[in-house]
Image: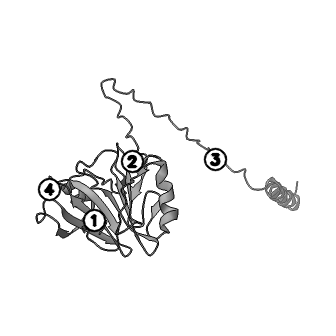
């Protein structure tokens, strides 16, 4: 073979090699290994049998209002149980018959003032003015007033509550005056709201509440039939 033929053969070989390289394309991508994490369950630690289980805290529930049960009534500057301050006297005292007996001892000087009695709960006195309820006294009726099953304020203060509890429940409590000893028997302690007073009068022991008054003036009436 002459030199020209060898040169042509080498050239054709190079062209063929280049063609094969172009047809082979890019090398295949190396596959990526994917690792999936598996959550490992946390083993439960058994409860210590010697550790007591805490008891659930009881939830306080209010006693449902009952017209025939004064112990379920609430005292506020707006009302005493079913009696609304400022309401028409006759319309308000009609509800009292479900729980109390109206006293037959009339007040000649104030015939509209009504006294209500019951053997197992403090009595009530309803004081009128111009045909409307001007004030209500709870307790303090008779020489030996009842202190059980009393209506209470929303702070839980009723007849028989110690003055210390009244002061704790009402930080704004003010000494109002007395019909007996200063800050002792028959002394009065008041809070004010909505233009009215709620006054706690101490009993003969000078330490516990003997009567509660709600009205437009701070002091309880000295005489209800005057």
The residue that label 2 is drawn on is: 71
Looking at the image, is 70 positioned above or below residue 3? above
- Tell me, yes or no, if residue 29 can be seen here: yes
Q: Is residue 112 left or right of residue 205?
A: right
Callout in the foreground (3, 1): 1
Marks 2 and 3, how far apart at CA:
81 Å
Q: Which mark is residue 32?
A: 3
Where is residue 51, by image quadrant? top left
Looking at the image, is 69 positioned above or below residue 54? below
Residue 76 image position (x, y, % from top left): 38, 63
Residue 1 image position (x, y, % from top left): 88, 53
Residue 225 image position (x, y, % from top left): 31, 66
Q: Secondary structure at mark 1?
A: strand
The residue that label 4 is drawn on is: 206
Q: Secondary structure at mark 3?
A: loop
Marks 4 and 3, how far apart at CA:
92 Å
Marks 4 and 3, the one that precedes in the sequence? 3
Callout in the foreground (2, 3): 2
Callout in the foreground (4, 3): 4
Q: Is residue 59 left or right of residue 221?
A: right
Query: How many other residues sit within 10 Å of disc 2, few (<14), some (14-19) or many (≥20)?
Result: many
Marks 2 and 1, how far apart at CA:
19 Å
Marks 3 and 1, how far apart at CA:
86 Å
The residue sitting at 31% across, 44% down in the picture is: 148
Query: How many other residues sit within 10 Å of disc 1, few (<14), some (14-19) or many (≥20)?
Result: many
Looking at the image, is 39 positioned above or below residue 27? above
């Amino acid at each position: 073979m002459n030199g020209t033929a060898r040169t042509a053969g080498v050239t054709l070989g190079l062209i063929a090699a280049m063609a094969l390289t172009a047809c082979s394309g890019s090398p295949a991508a190396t596959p990526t290994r994917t690792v999936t994490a598996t959550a490992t369950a946390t083993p439960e630690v058994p409860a210590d049998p010697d550790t007591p289980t805490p008891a659930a805290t009881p939830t306080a529930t209010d006693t449902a209002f009952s017209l025939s049960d004064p112990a379920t009534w609430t005292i506020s500057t707006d009302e005493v149980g079913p009696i609304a301050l400022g309401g028409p006297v006759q319309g308000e005292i009609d509800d009292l018959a479900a729980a109390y007996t109206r006293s037959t001892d009339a007040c000649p000087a104030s015939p509209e003032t009504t006294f209500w009695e019951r053997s197992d709960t403090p009595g009530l006195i309803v004081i009128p003015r111009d045909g409307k309820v001007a004030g209500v006294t709870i307790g303090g009726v008779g020489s030996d007033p009842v202190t059980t099953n009393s209506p209470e304020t929303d702070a839980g203060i009723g007849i028989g509550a110690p003055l210390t509890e009244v002061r704790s429940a009402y930080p704004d409590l003010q000494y109002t005056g007395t019909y007996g000893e200063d800050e002792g028997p028959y002394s009065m302690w008041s809070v004010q709201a909505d233009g009215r007073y709620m006054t706690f009068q101490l009993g003969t022991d000078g330490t516990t509440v003997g009567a509660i008054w709600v009205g437009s003036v701070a002091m309880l009436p000295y005489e209800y039939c005057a």
